[in-house]
Amino acid sequence: MKKDNQDASRYSELGVSASKQGLHDALQRAGVESSAGFFAQLGPDIAGDPAYISLLHCDGAGTKALLAYLYACDTNDTSVYASLSQDALVMNLDDILCVGLPSGMSIANAISRNARLIPDEAISRIIGRYKELVDSLNNLGFPLTMTGGETADMGDVVRTLVVDATIAARIPKDRLVDTRNICSGDVIIGLSSTGRASYEDSENSGIGSNGLTLARHALLTEDYLSLYPEVCDPQTAAEHRLRGPFRMTDLPSGLGMSIGKALLSPTRTYAPVLRKVFESLGRDVHGVIHCTGGGQTKVLRFGPGSLKFIKDNLFPEPPVFRLI
């Protein structure tokens, strides 16, 4: 418990919340209730079919966009912005898959930028990568359509870049995964975020899209504060800002890639694996948890409250997390 409190304190010092308890309380006061037992909020089918539910899921690349900006500034390589599309897409897609296997999906993107700092080429990289990912997912059997989007120039509001997306999905009710079915004796199976999956084209550090604020300030050098002051909230206390030893292009021993590439490794989708699991096991799948915000403790928000979850055979700690 002491370590949990220390971690929460470190996040708070950087202006973020790991638990988002304040947000959950605010939603409750606003009268917004979650769909009990389900990983995402469900609604009536948009087409009016009583055999289906619909859901609209919003998420994004978060402060990972700052890292792409820093990497591009250091290297003049704008191709790095493309990976943010996968972060935004997967943070939506894999949350949806925790509810069940969709029969159809549509994605819209929302980009906000400081146009003085983020060039049009960066926007082209992001949107082009969305199209590549949509095509790839369709080839893997996931019916996803790329629809419209919005790119807003908001220099007075956005310091650098925000990359968000929304996915709309329809899921047959007989495919829904209700975590209230989790019971004593169930087996917990974890899927790694590191290495290289058979459907990926490069090694992944496993960093995902959560905790990047802490990672950035723990690993990156304060030199960036004078070079690019826009990458840090000026209200963050000086002793907590960018206190690491590394530049984005540094290659620490044992990491297997540069710090920048490790922090920008695109969030892994488990969609191809989950599809096979759903097709093989069907209703025997009692719960699927996307371990994003909250990490290994996220499961505590789901399932019957009386259960104890035991994870006693975890993967080795990835090198990037040891550095943090």
Image (spheres, rainbow, N blue to C red):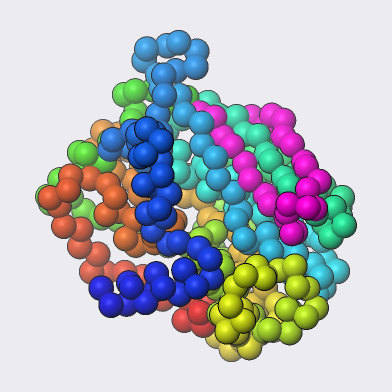
Quadrant (top left, top right, bottom left, bottom right) of the N terminus: bottom left
Quick check: 153 above or below 292?
Answer: above
Q: 192 or 148, which lies in front?
A: 148
What residue is at 72 percent from the left and 45 percent from the top?
Answer: 111
Q: Toward which corner of the image does residue 177 lie, by quadrant?
A: top left
Q: In the image, residue 322 lies at what x, y percent?
A: 47, 81
Q: 139 or 269, which lies in front?
A: 269
What residue is at 53 percent from the left and 26 percent from the top?
Answer: 104
Q: In the image, residue 156 lies at what x, y percent?
A: 78, 52
Q: Toward which corner of the image does residue 296 lie, by quadrant?
A: bottom left
Q: 40 or 190, which lies in front?
A: 40
What residue is at 62 percent from the left and 34 percent from the top?
Answer: 107
What residue is at 73 percent from the left and 54 percent from the top?
Answer: 158
Quick check: 33 above or below 202?
Answer: above
Magenta part, dominant SS:
strand
Q: How many labels does the image show?
A: 0
Residue 116 visible in the picture: yes
User: Bounds of the magenta span?
Assistant: 140-169
Q: Is residue 143 magenta?
A: yes
Quick check: 229 above or below 42?
Answer: below
Q: 41 or 5, which lies in front?
A: 5
Q: In the image, residue 76 lies at what x, y percent?
A: 86, 69
